[in-house]
DNA sequence: GCAATATCTGTAAACGTTTCCAGTAGCTGT
DNA sequence: ACAGCTACTGGAAACGTTTACAGATATTGC
């Protein structure tokens, strides 16, 4: 019937232009709400509706240089702490009109670097990355990255990176203080790998807290393993064999704590009467356990939100309720914005795994 | 110094062509491994390396019509069953060279339809969607979708959709059989909304199993609420108030079961001696609970994997180890491939929440 | 060394948009 | 009805690739 355009694929701006008898420029303008004569607008809208036109986002990205996609890379989606981040990132990103690309890196450095480098492919407009080991290569790759990157975690202080961190050493300290203050004297530690930032910090906080409370550090009371439930189970067995008199276990995350709890149950040891258990992350697992776990809230959700907001700001999405006066507009063009570090305060959440519930 | 190209943005194929003194066509050919004279290849590679060239995936997508992105849309990333799917989908997609876009729909129909329709934007090459309510609009939208869609779930039998399903009615039946066969007589049900496919199926399986074992259906023993931990806690309280003599609770998923377990603990009721509890999904929560939960494995991971493989096949990625002879190549072009339904078999996993552990 | 061939290379078009620029049509005021 | 202005419109270029085609080299056989 008609000349062309109706042919094969989905309708484009060209099909609409033909059908409406206008130029593609006019179609584009109508569709983007630029001022147009009433008659033109109506014909274009009609044609677009009849054809069921939907703009091609790839073409739009190519022209506009923005994909409206963000990437989140984390070590392990099996860890509820990261799930909490994903959820929050998704919400904020979606609200700002961005889609979310997900990467699981298994905490493998090469994979993490690959994700950073892949920004050069222009597949997404920005990256939130959550590395548990931060090498000089990480820092360099991120500093050189071809799109904004926000790190969730704690890079070395001299690294000029945007990041959202939490002081998990203090978090660990708070947990151990709490254990000591509720009368525990032989407090064990089940930690993740100490060559990771979280592992190192937890170790540091644990030791400091012991000193603070006049307890001595005893290597026999510590175990180092992976951040996972099964690892917690095994480590707890080992510790109990070695030191049957321990009266508390502080675990570097909730997964480890859950594992430890299983071991204690299996051995008929009462929580918290015989042994108290505390975890970190305050993830859903802390509430899922029995007894509910005392845990240090490291603000996963909040960090996810803050990271996303910071990233959006770097992307020039004036982060709406920024509260501050809109001053920083005067950027001398070549000065990169000063890296910003945001810190959240860890918070101890006490539950029945360390303190018996008062009977009802 | 040089004429042009070095200017602003990242290096393109044009910059390389200039630097190497060849045409952009040659650059493209070298970079895509097409046959080239040795000298040309070397100069191009050298120039590309010096400039740190990375191909622009958006431009590539526009030309090629493929984005190498898949989308996964699920109701709630807080549910570990979906997390299991995400993880598996990620792995398979990544192995095939696809990135993964994530959508959380909160099980809101409009959001789900929007995701399906957004395929027309060509943002991703295919979609895996996991709706818990499947309306005629869903079916129609998916049938008309402008890219392949695989449903994880159970659309009505007459819907011509690719899907990966599991018979959760039978799953529920198996769980209730097990409870009855271990001596329980007053078996309660905590279900999710019955206007969802999973809710309806669980209800059906529960009733069938009761009949099978000569138990009568008692509305006073059932509660309907949301698929969430807090909902499980509340529902269990309600049921126990109403029927203090119940001796088992079958829960429509692990989150509800976990909630129920909390309630039982809080009331000092012993599991499984006084009341047995069974859940569904066999998620990490089932192992996290104490006592570990008997649960019906609905194959979340496997369904995620199968769905992704099916989707990749629809995308023409010859799914490698397909085993079959490569016959179906002869497609008469207009016949759409016959919709395929894959079903996984639910499997009961018995743990201590229904059967006391034999003492060691 | 020459023709015939095989191999490689460059030009240009295409993918679907947005946007600059110049031109044209429509208004306004008289 | 006309000048002058504004408001809209169409042509064309651009974003960074891939690829068909034709044209240019290099290779081979004698």
Image (spheres, coloured by chain):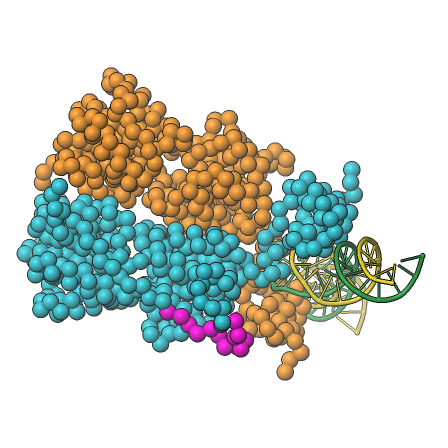
Chain colours: A orange, B cyan, C green, D yellow
Q: Quadrant of residue A174?
A: top left
Residue B100 in sight here: yes
Give percent across and percent down for residue A274.
14, 31
Left or right placement of residue B142 versus residue B295 in this view:
right
Above-or-below relation of D8 to A233 = below
Judging depth in this view, the residue of B49 and B15 nearest the camera is B49
Which residue is pictured at 21% across the width and 60% down the height? B191
Confirm whether the magenta stretch covers residue B305. no
Residue B236 in sight here: no
Most prominent secondary structure in the magenta stretch? loop
Give percent across and percent down for residue A339.
52, 33
Q: Quadrant of residue C29?
A: bottom right
Give percent across and percent down for residue B87.
39, 51
Left or right placement of residue A161 versus residue C12 in this view:
left
Q: Residue furthest bottom?
A: A1
Which residue is pictured at 39% across the width and 61% down the height? B306
Judging depth in this view, the residue of B150 and B182 nearest the camera is B182
Q: Quadrant of residue A227?
A: top left
Left or right placement of residue B193 versus residue C11 in this view:
left
Give the magenta part as a residue range: B328-341
Left or right placement of residue B339 versus residue A251 in this view:
right
């Amino acid at each position: 019937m008609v000349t062309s355009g109706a042919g094969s694929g989905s309708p484009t701006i060209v099909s609409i232009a033909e059908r409406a008898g206008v130029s593609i420029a006019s179609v584009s303008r109508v569709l983007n709400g630029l001022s147009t004569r009433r008659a033109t607008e109506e014909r274009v809208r009609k044609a677009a509706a009849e054809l069921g036109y939907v703009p091609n986002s790839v073409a739009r990205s190519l022209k506009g240089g923005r994909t409206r996609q963000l990437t989140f890379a984390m070590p392990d989606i099996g860890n509820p702490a990261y799930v909490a981040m994903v959820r929050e990132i998704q919400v904020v990103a979606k609200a700002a009109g961005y889609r979310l690309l997900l990467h699981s890196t298994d905490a493998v450095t090469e994979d993490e670097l690959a994700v950073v480098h892949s920004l050069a492919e222009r597949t997404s407009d920005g990256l939130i990355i959550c590395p548990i080991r931060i090498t000089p290569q990480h820092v360099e790759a991120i500093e050189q990255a071809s799109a904004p990157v926000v790190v969730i975690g704690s890079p070395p202080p001299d690294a000029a990176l945007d990041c959202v961190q939490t002081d998990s050493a203090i978090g660990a300290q708070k947990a151990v203080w709490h254990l000591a203050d509720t009368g525990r004297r032989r407090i064990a530690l089940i930690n993740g790998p100490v060559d990771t930032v979280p592992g190192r910090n937890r170790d540091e906080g644990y030791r400091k807290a012991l000193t603070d409370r006049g307890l001595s550090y005893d290597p026999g009371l510590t175990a180092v393993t992976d951040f996972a439930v099964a690892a917690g189970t095994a480590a707890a067995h080992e510790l109990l064999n070695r030191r049957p008199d321990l009266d508390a276990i502080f675990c570097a995350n909730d997964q480890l704590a859950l594992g430890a709890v299983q071991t204690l149950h299996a051995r008929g040891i009462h929580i918290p009467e015989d042994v108290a258990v505390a975890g970190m992350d305050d993830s859903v697992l802390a509430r899922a356990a029995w007894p509910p776990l005392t845990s240090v809230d490291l603000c996963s959700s909040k960090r996810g939100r803050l990271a996303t907001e910071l990233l959006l700001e770097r992307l020039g999405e004036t982060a709406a309720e920024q509260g501050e006066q809109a001053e920083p507009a005067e950027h001398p063009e070549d000065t990169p914005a000063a890296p910003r570090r945001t810190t959240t305060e860890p918070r101890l959440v006490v539950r029945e795994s360390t303190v018996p519930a008062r009977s009802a």
